[in-house]
Structure formats: structure tokens, C-alpha cells
Amino acid sequence: MMLPVGNKNQPLMAHMWPTTLWGMYGYQNAGAQQQYASPQQQMPGQQMPGGQMPGGYGQQPPLYPEPSPPSLADAVRAFTTGSMSAEDFQQIFATSKVYCPRGDNPGFLALHNTQQPVIPMFTSLKELRRYAGKESKYFVITGAEVIDLLPTGYGFVLDMEGEHRMVFDAKAVEQMVEFAMRRMYG
């Protein structure tokens, strides 16, 4: 946006500025002359009306930071030890990043040497590298996308080489899909 520029001989007039910027930057219209709004005089440490401190947009940092949601690895650990409900785990899983090994073709890599075919997935790149090696190819999706894209009849394994490995068979995946649908559509 180009703003008008005055010269020393001609002061800027109120009509030269877009009205939306005029009041926004603290200008007052005093006839043909332009003036800045005078700042209020404050003594150091003195509070403004409403208990606000000067100079910080009236905001003080919170005394205690908001707790961050547990990571997927923390949720796996809590769920496998029984300290987290299935519903809470699923809510965290749905919004978490899931690391999946990939081959040359798009899609999930499945293990067929199990009772049911399962797809290995990991809570972190570190866990994936432990299983598939440092140079392995991978893609990252959310848990909700896993539930949406997983082929029918397949399960998945979280952190196959990890301390708290979790296996979800095809029936468990169906239950996760039903839970997600109930949550989304009531």
C-alpha cells in the first residue's frame, strides 16, 4: 500500500490518509494541522486503570504455562500401562503425527507374516529408524488419516521395536473408526 508523502513546505492533511489508518495510529485531526496524540505520563512501576502495567499491551505473562497435550509416545505408554482410557488415547492418536515406512510405490507397507496383515507405524522418527534403518523412506500422517486410509481387514502396530509396542488388529481398527464417526457425527 502506498501512503502519501508530504514535503517540508506542505504538511500532510487528514484527507491524504486513508481513514482506517488515521485513528489506528493515534493521529488526531486538529484543523489543518496534524498532531500526535500525547502519551500519558507514567511513573515507573505505576499501574494504569484496570490493573494493567504500562508498556506491555496490558498483558502479563501467565503465572503457569498451559500444559501441552501428551505426545503420542506418552499416550502409548499410559494406555499400555492402564493409566489412560481408550477414548483419551484415541483423541490423542487422532491429532498426533504417525511415521510410516514406505516403499517405492505410494501406500502403506504391510507385514503379511502375521495372523492378520498389519502395518508398522511409529510414534517418532527415532522409533521408525530403530526398526527400518537410518536411510529408510517414510511418510508422516495424522492418526485420524491412518484410521481413514487404512485398508479394510488390516491392523497396525505402533512402535514395533519399542518398549511399549501396541498391536491393533482389524477388529480394533473397526472400533476406532466407529468411535471417530460417533465423535464426528454424534
Image: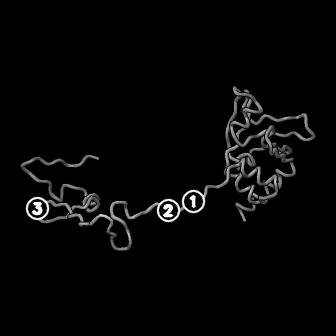
Q: Amino acid at mark 2?
A: Pro
Residue 57 sits in which quadrant?
A: bottom left
Residue 44 point in image, percent of width and height? 30, 64
- In what element is the residue under mark 1? loop
Q: Which residue is mark 3?
A: 32
Residue to which mark 2 is pinned: 62
Residue receiving disc 1 = 66
Give the camera-side residue of 50 and 167.
Answer: 50
Q: Is residue 142 left or right of residue 160?
A: left
Residue 160 in picture, x, y percent from top left: 81, 39
The answer to whether mark 1 and mark 2 are in CB contact below 8 A is yes
Q: Secondary structure at mark 2?
A: loop
For marks 3 and 2, the one nearer the N-term is 3
Q: Residue furthest right?
A: 115
Q: Nearer the viewer, residue 37 or 103?
A: 37
Would you say residue 151 is visible in this rendering? no
Q: Tag 1: residue type?
A: Glu
Rounded to the nearest angstrom, the CA distance separating label 1 from label 2 is 8 Å
Nearer to me, 66 or 2: 66
Q: What residue is rendered at 12% in x and 65% in y?
A: 31
Residue displayed at 70% across by 27% down: 134
* Separation of residues labelled 3 and 2 (CA atoms): 45 Å
